[in-house]
Amino acid sequence: MIDGQDQAARLRRLVAEVRGGKTGARVTSALVPTRVVAVTSGKGGVGKTSISINLALALAQRKLKVAILDADLGLANVDIAMGIMPKYNLAHVMRGEKTLEEIIVEGPLGVSVIASGSGVSDLANLTDEKREAMLGALASLKRQFDFLIIDTSAGLGRNVLGFVLAADEILVVTTPEPTAFIDGYSMIKVVLQANRDAKVKLVINQVRDATEAREVADRLVLLANRFLGAVVTPESFVVRDPAVGEAVREQTPLLMLYPNCAAAKCIQGLAAKLASGRTAGAKSDLRGFFSRVVELIRRQ
């Protein structure tokens, strides 16, 4: 049995090797860098997917080119929440049945949606030939994006960690609810133990007001500093708003249905923060990102 310290040490070595370029994956540096933001959580039910979708839309409202990848295997519902129905997903690309261009669906405000289906779980089992074919498809993608938003599954599975540890920055979504807080800290701990340089940012969802958000964020920041010796950034918060539930029921993104509600304004504020430093966080083209994801998942 592998204990927590051994697992953390193994993850650190793995991340260092993958980010250090020892994977053998070819990266096409001529492509425009895309800033990859993984939106994740320690547990489900904290509003992660809603924030992912509406953040993508808020960035698109700022005239940025945005794609969103639904990497939540357990509850893959980005398409439903955006009111679209993709016919194909990453699994079709891996099997050579479709190109990446053919599976991308345009959502509201021109946001490109990449459905994963079973494609995420299949990443760990790709042959070298299929892996290169998929990475080649990403390299040849004509569209270039300023942002790629990854809506991960909740929890600490290897697929989740593959996307999270490969991303340029990580938004950990949690709420004031005790179990969500504890699970959020667990996610932060695993990420920072694997990569102390990871850009971990907090989004506190479903709060009464800024005061409650600050209290929750301060506790997480203190725990990370005291027990992990690491810095976690309290990036933003989203207030509890009945409009969010109504948007879910209507299968229409919050920013499209109630753009002036309190929660929508909070998400627009988060987008403004991310957009203000959008070139600083971009490190690789999409092929480079997915190369890291594949290697991290395969070698965990």
Image (cartoon, rainbow, N blue to C red):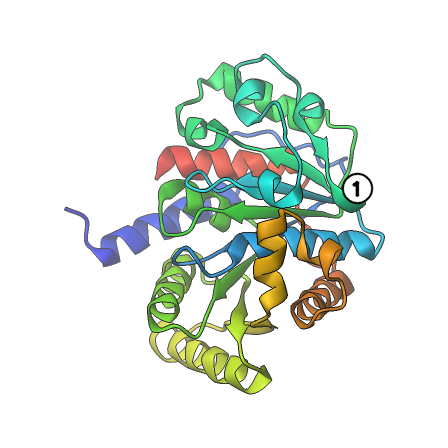
The three-letter code of the residue at mark 1 reads: Gly
What x and y, as percent, mark residue 80?
Answer: 59, 40
- Splitting the image into 4 quarters, where does residue 85 fall? top right
Q: Name the side, left or right, on which 2 lies relative to 21.
A: left
Q: Is residue 69 above or below residue 242?
A: above
Q: Secondary structure at mark 1?
A: helix
Residue most toward the top? 97
Residue name at image x 71 percent, y 62 percent:
271
Taking the image as drawn, is residue 21 in sight? no
Residue 125 placement (x, y as % from top left): 39, 24
Horizontal side of residue 222 vs 274, given as left or right: left
| Residue 298, x across and y down, in percent | 39, 32
- How crowded is the residue under tag 1: few (<14 C-alpha within 10 Å), some, or many (20+)? some
Q: Quadrant where the C terminus lies?
A: top left
The number of numbered badges drawn on the structure is: 1
Pick whichever, 283 or 37, lies toward us: 37
Residue 23 in sight in this render: yes
- Residue 207 to residue 86: above or below: below
Residue pointed to by mark 1: 110
Q: Residue at x 47, y 18 (%)?
A: 128
Residue lying at the far right of the rendered structure: 63
Above or below, comparing residue 207 to residue 67 in the picture: below
Horizontally, is 101 left or right of 186 in the view? right
Location of residue 210 (image quadrant): bottom right
Give coordinates of residue 196: x percent, y percent: 45, 62
From what the image shows, is residue 41 above or below residue 219?
above
The one of 140 and 178 positioned closer to us in this rendering: 178
Give the farthest residue toward the bottom.
211
The residue that appears at 44% across and 17% down in the rendered structure is: 127
